[in-house]
Amino acid sequence: MSATQYTTKHAVDELVDSYQRVPMLVIATHPDRSRIGERAALIDLHNEGNDYLSRVKPEFAKNGNAGRALLDEFISRSPIIFQSEPDGRIKLRAHSTKTTVTVVGRGVQDEYVLHERELDNGVVIGLNHRIVLLLKLLPLHDSAVDDNDVLFGISSDIRAIRQRVEQLASMSLPVMIRGAAGVGKQQAAYAIHQASERRDKPFISVNLAAIHDAVAEAELFGSERDGNRQLGYFEQANGGTIVLEDIEDASVNVHRLLHTVLQSGSVVPVGTEDTQPINCRIMFTSHKDPGDIEENSTLSMLIEKLSAYQLFIPPLTERREDIGLLFDYFVREQWQKLYGNRAYDAKISGELMSQLMTFHWPGNVRQLRNVARQVVIDSRDQEQLHLDPQLLSMLRPTSVNGHWEEETHVQRRPNSVSRNELLETLESCRFELQATAKKLGISRASVYQLIQRFEGVRTAQDLSEEEIKQSYEKNRSDTEKMMWDLQVSQIGLRRRLKSLGYDI
């Protein structure tokens, strides 16, 4: 049985622990665009220290389909050899192949040594400037791709988020969605809405930073003047979902208005005395680390009120295996918008994809979509996708090893943290996320990311009310004992208990 068949049949227990990462090749671009996103696990490299890549080996697959090799006539049948080296390194040897093998950021060589940090981040490998692969340490699970999924990608993070979305869809509790600008926080909120029973009701997204204090009350809660009734955002979302975008960017006055209304559970439109109950699910997004928010401020109290559950969306650079798929998806989307029924037949060049895979994407998925739009505009009459040279030069990697400047303060990549290491560190740090992040050498946001990726690891927000009630009674309201019983932060647990009205 091939490595691909193992992954598609989910027989991971026969090979490695399901949370353990193995060297994985992901197709970022291929002359056959339908193959973008296919993966092949280098199981022999993981288990025996050697593996091979050629036109006929290994087999790549996605969506549980049968595997197939690269099968490109310009790729040699002679093997490119992967060898395990000490300290987690991998040696890539291209001595005996006619295929031109490039590792992006380095000159053409017959042999490359790839360090573990690079493999955590993902190494971009070009074959004859036609096929681009990402070599990365990834969990051994099937890669599911659905063009109709709002949350599109094959990474472990996107897979974990999709699972959380399914769990959250049947609930009505507020959700806080965290992540940097452009990562897709609104798309995650929409995915929850679409998977819920509210899908046929309104989905209202509100840019809080754009609301001026002078009209804030009327815009949020509605108004009536001279018999003319204007619905506010909360009333417009009646029966559906309201998303309050980047809540920390709103004014203090807006924070106070929201806090007052959420305390009462109702709105009073300006110019009336009519009380209208809030009848919508509330979500909000945040691009700030919770540690950066002043304690006991109106904003902190508002966030505490709203954050019954937290969902973290990681930056694009931490899920580079999604870039090829996302770019192809956005190009097809923009081509349809700009050129209607004209067939999309342009090819994605290896050079362009290599640039995309190694750019640091400060604007995340939103920026990638904007680049795709420009590529489509520039490539209308081209045989392959073309990008303006000035913009292409901006997409060059910022260092030869693909380690970006803004990440130099982080001691290690979050992908290098195993589930067992995370669990042990959480326990040694009394489940406090900031202390755990410091001990692991990663950011607190990355700890959130890992918690939602690994099954069985939780925060206080993940606990059901029934679990909390049982533990509260069993431990006679002792939050120290409850912490060890439930395996979550005592501080987070006390906040959750307080929000549920428990006496602590």
Image: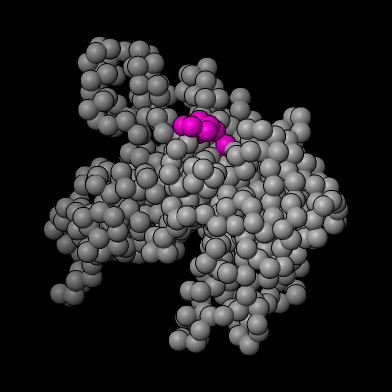
- Is 47 above or below relative to 371? above
- Is 33 above or below relative to 451? below
Can residue 165 be found in the magenta stretch?
Answer: no
Q: Residue at x 47, y 81 (%)?
A: 337
Res 255 seen here: no
- Provide the major secondary structure of the magenta segment: loop
Res 39 seen here: yes
- Image position of 441 (left or right of 247): right
Measured from the top left, where is residue 267 in percent x and y? 21, 54
- Is 229 above or below relative to 470? below
Measured from the top left, where is residue 431 in percent x and y? 47, 23
Instruction: Give the image quarter of residue 486.
Output: top left
What coloring was used for the rendering? one colour
Work out whether residue 131 or residue 59 is closer to the camera in this orientation and state it: 59
- Image position of 397 (left or right of 139): right
Work out whether residue 282 or residue 187 is closer to the camera in this orientation and state it: 187
Measured from the top left, where is residue 295 in percent x and y? 46, 33
Q: Residue at x 57, y 37 (%)?
A: 21
Measured from the top left, where is residue 255 in percent x and y? 38, 49
Q: Residue at x 46, y 86 (%)?
A: 340
Q: Residue at x 15, y 74 (%)?
A: 227
- Image position of 344 (left or right of 382): left
Tally the numbered discs.
0
Instruction: Give the image quarter of residue 243.
Output: bottom left
Work out whether residue 264 or residue 459 is closer to the camera in this orientation and state it: 459
For the C terminus, the image quarter is: top left
Work out whether residue 263 or residue 187 is closer to the camera in this orientation and state it: 187
Can residue 17 be found in the magenta stretch?
Answer: yes
Q: Which residues are magenta?
A: 13-21
